[in-house]
Amino acid sequence: MTRTFSTICVGLVALAAGCDRNSPPVEPASIDAALRQDLARWGVIPIGPMPAQDPALVALGRTLMFDKILSGNRDISCATCHQPSEHAADGLSLAVGTGGTGLGQSRTLGPGRQFVPRNAPTLVNAGLGLFYLFWDGRISGFHSGPFTTPAGSALPPDLPNILAAQAMFPVVDRREMRGERGDLDVFGNPNELAQFGDSQLVEIWQAAMRRVLAIPEYVTMFNAAFPDTPTSRLGFQHAATAIAAFEMQPLTKTDSPFDRYLNRDDAALTLEQKRGALLFFGKARCSSCHNGPFLGGGQFANNGAPQLGPGRGAGAPLDFGHGDVFNNEFDRFTFRVAPLRNVELTAPYFHDGAYPTLAAVVRHYNNVPVALRGFDVSQLAPALSSLYHGDEATISAVLATLDFRLRQPLGLTNDEQRDVVAFLESLTDPSARDLRSLTPAVVPSGLPVQE
Amino acid sequence: MTSPGVFFSRLLFTFLFHVFFSRLLLAQLISIKTVPIAQGDQFEIFPSHNLAMGGVSIAVPDTLLDPFRNPAKGARLAAAPRFFGSPTFYGVSNGAGGGRTLPLAAVTQAGSWFGGLSLALQEVDPSRPPVGVAVPFVAQARAAILPDVPDPGPDQGSHGNAYAFAMLGKVLAEPRLSLAGSVSWSRLTAVDGVDLLYPGSQAIRQLGHAADFRIGMLKEWAGDRALEAVALHDRFGMTDDVTYLDSFWDPGTQRVLQRARVEHELDRTNTWGLHLQYERPLGASGWRVGWLATGNLMSHPKIPNYEIMNIARDPGRSHAYNLGIGFSRTNGPATFGIDAIYEPIWSETWAEAEAPTGTALGDTIPAGGKTVENHFRFSDAVFRMGISRELTIGRRAPAALLQLGLAARSIHYRLDQYDRVQVSGRNQVESWVEWTPTWGLSVRFPELELRYSGRVTKGTGRPGVGTRANGWALEDASAVRAGSLLVAPSGPLTLDAVSVVTHQVSLSLPIR
């Protein structure tokens, strides 16, 4: 028995030493579990409430946004290119600045005018705290500054946020709002804002404020919005601050189904949208750029967008985008990755509005080189067809710096592409579909609002 | 064990209570386990003669533990009234938990009546390291924690549990027929491993009770044959208040901030059970044979929504059975025993719609209707074997007992899941084996017996205890290379191999 006991002891020890487990369980998670993992991995988190803005400030900003008095020729307001009826954009591929006529998608160039080189982005959710503004990111900064802008030290120091800093610039841009030397305004009077040199930013801002404060109703509104600032010390930065407040308050729209899903409502998205989301964060690689709280906005990338329009900066008639800001060849043709909330409402897409639908955008990303070489000009407005740069040299230049994540085809099937579009449509806050109530009937200058 | 493929988030849920208590009262309560997560031997609090023999129990009587399983078996123990103390320590490797228990018990008799009483205090350590706040943020953002967020802080302290057990029985007739009843009650503020089931949480506050009522019968015939029966009702209820810190983007400060969220998770399970066991000698060769049969009917009025789960479920019900056979042979000072138990289990859980919910087919599931159904079919098996050998020290024999054993538990199940909202279904088959070598040594003195038993369980794991930072595995390295993101607390987890080591020192001495 002693031998038996010893044998069994040895056997037990040997058996115990050799024991190991079977293959561990591995099985795909449920769609919600998988999606929430993806959301966490890509830093997609809910957006908190926007701090309430001073009503007097918002009221002033709304009025200024729609008043053409800020433009040199008194013929265009901020809202002309950021139309409530077009979801705070203009529905055009390339914006039409001063001298143009009409609103929204029916707006046309004035005689002798050129398109603004880039698409007018929506102002919806512009106040969420993006770090870069404008397609080329030439304005950047954190909450309270300092802000990096083309104005350098000329920028007033007391701007409260980056959105206010951005609002300083459309009025100094000749194509957008200021006009060309020798322009006459809508009343036939000389455009005094256009007479300044392009580097005389301070003088332009001062001149614009002189116009505004010449109207008593504006003085009252400014005094209500800035009770601690004497009228004599009011500058254009105060106007920009008010415009920013307007953008932050009624133009923040973050109650989309996707936002509700982020706040732990699994039923907020349809199955199709969830499938699309999994593709968005997975196979389609969208999230490698469109990530974080805004699903974009924090990076620059060359997405292989067709070159379209008059161009800008040193690359004209091409548009080097972010590469032009820093004169950097590596960044040529890179543009800010657009934040995607409410993207369904803001066609056409890309920095030059090359694609009219989300389906076309997803198709483009599915195989960028092929899409770029096969770009269909017919999807552009007739006035833009001649401005498409589809020559081999341009295409090769764009593809040379194409983002590495887009160099290989994604291999999305048609159904998968539809699912991705369905997900993108889940980013729409229903209250953003109709913003027309934001348009005031009249503005203090008496200039027409809806013409 | 390194188990890179064990994605915790892809696993299912575990009926913790039954996992734990089944160890304590194996064969009467059948465990249901769907996750190969390691559990500490928290409820291994009563002294056991056979713990070091792999826990064999069908054909080898466990004179110390049997009265706690079947109170009628107290009649055997009460013949020699004794006092027990069995301080028990368990630890999970890699610092992934541990606990200490000091139970005190006494069993005595008066005439044909017998009874016992046991009290135990326990301290359980947290099973995981404090959660590092991995805030997802855009690279350019300045991540911050809102200073006025009520931050409960990581829960690093140990928490205590208390247990009470009482039994009362009577020997009714000769040949012996014993009837007894027992009640056990537990106040629980710490169930080992529960904190692992809520990854990413900041703190967990547990509070609950467990009650177990048993009526046992033991019929012994001449020739050393015995039949026992146990009817039981068991109620378990825990509330887990789980605090999470949710990250969100604050447009006002242009920062990632956090806010506290407390989830109240209820865990309720009620069990009715019936257990039969029979043993008898096989001739005069020292062999014995035994069999057991058990049925459990369980209702799960509420199962917690563990953060790791991927299966929606609210209530559920299960019926579980086991059939086992055991052999033993005693030859002089040596005893060998082996058990083989098969456990078929059927379990169904489901999720209920909180509000009318539309389906992919356009139908509407009314509030309270089932949205997701999970059907589990288990084929579990338990094998145990052990040996003991009495040793002679000096001229006085027997004075010591050496024990070795091994237990293997095989879990195999198939899940069929139906999602009535998405009108889809899937199935899943899982299996793994847990191994538990055991050892022990006891020394007998004329006035007392001192016993040491130990065991180590392998084949399971715990998340977040390996070398990976905070245990969060970066599933997709490209996410890091892209330079934009850090992995977030609810990201994918992997189980890291751990061993659960238990040491029990029991002291037994006669009361009179």
Image (cartoon, rainbow, N blue to C red):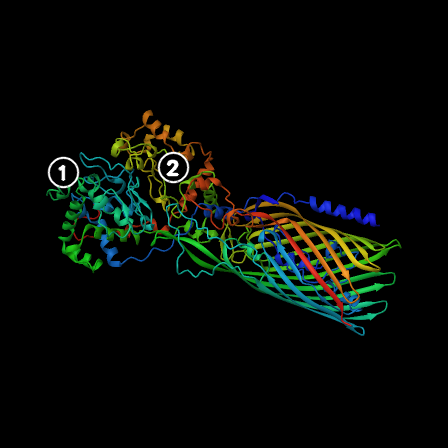
Residue for point 22% across, 58% down: A225
* Residue beneath disc 1: A181
- Residue B384 in picture, x, y percent from top left: 74, 51
Q: Secondary structure at mark 2?
A: helix
Picture layout, residue B30 above or below residue A37 = below
Left/right placement of residue B251 relative to residue B162 reads: left
Q: Nearer the viewer, residue B234 or B170?
A: B170
Residue A332 on image: x %, y %:
32, 33
Q: Work out whether residue A26 can be spotted.
A: no
Residue B343 in sight from this viewpoint: yes
Q: Chain of mark 2?
A: A
In the depicted view, which residue is nearer to us: B331 or A370?
A: B331
2 and 1 marks on the same chain? yes
- The quarter of the picture where the N terminus of chain B appears is top right
Residue type at numbered disc 2: Val
Residue A305 in the figure: left or right of residue A228: right
Are there few (<14), some (14-19), or many (20+) residues within 10 Å of tag 1? some
Q: Earlier in the sequence, mark 2 or mark 1?
A: 1
Q: Nearer the viewer, residue B38 or B374?
A: B38
- In this rendering, the label closer to the viewer, 2 or 1: 1
Q: Is residue A320 above or below residue B216?
A: above
**Which amino acid type is shown beneath numbered disc 1?**
Arg
- Whether residue B192 sits left or right of residue A213 in the image: it is right
Question: Residue B200 location in percent, x, y?
Answer: 50, 53
Question: Could you say whether the residue bearing mark 1 is in a helix, strand or loop?
Answer: loop
**Residue furthest left as drawn:** A189
Q: Which residue is mark 2?
A: A361
Distance from Cα at disc 2 to Cα at disc 1? 39 Å
